[in-house]
Image (spheres, helix red, strand yellow):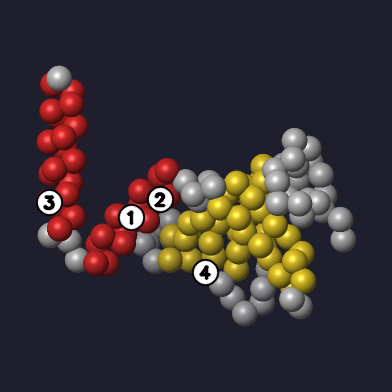
Amino acid sequence: MRNISKVLLSLSAASLLMVGCTQETQNQIGRAINNWTGTNGVLEVYTGGKLVRRFVKIDKLSTATGTNSSADRPYRFGNGYLDANLNGLADKEESYVYFEISDYSTQYVFYEAPKVMPVQ
């Protein structure tokens, strides 16, 4: 019973804090929770209108920040399965890899070498 009371009190306090926050602060809190819990997302990379890479079961996609500053770096990063056969599933022979996506005009996706390389 005490645990339930503590949970309800915590949820009530969190709700009151959220009401007093600006929309941007609420968005930041939501993104932080989303980064913590994950989204099970899909990232598709197209070149010339054609799908060339797909990453599935992405835990989260984050913006890199500087080591000695809080400035954002010009890329996003995440972890997920490289869908080598582009079937939309994380097959058992496909690798869970780290990847980065550029914000620069030269488009690229950097990813860890998988066990199974995608077909060209």
Disc 4 residue crowd, few under 14, some 14–19, many 20+, Cα 10 Å: few
Of the image marks 3 and 1, the number of the one nearer the N terminus? 3
What residue is disc 3 on?
A: 16
In space, the residues marked 1 and 4 are separated at their CA atoms by 22 Å
State whether residue 113 appears in this view. no
Q: Amino acid at mark 1?
A: Gly
Which residue is pictured at 13% across the width and 43% down the height?
12
Of the image marks 1 and 4, the number of the one nearer the N terminus? 1
Viewer-side label of 1, 4: 1
x and y, in percent, of residue 106 in the image = 66, 77
Which residue is pictured at 67% across the width and 46% down the height?
81
Of the image marks 2 and 3, the number of the one nearer the N terminus? 3
The circle on residue 74 is 4
Q: Quadrant of residue 11?
A: top left
Q: Is residue 102 left or right of residue 7?
A: right
Q: Amino acid at mark 2?
A: Asn
Disc 1 to disc 4: CB gap under 8 Å: no
Disc 1 to disc 2: CB gap under 8 Å: yes
In space, the residues marked 4 and 3 are separated at their CA atoms by 35 Å
What residue is disc 1 on?
A: 30
In front: 29, or 16?
A: 16
Q: Amino acid at mark 3?
A: Leu
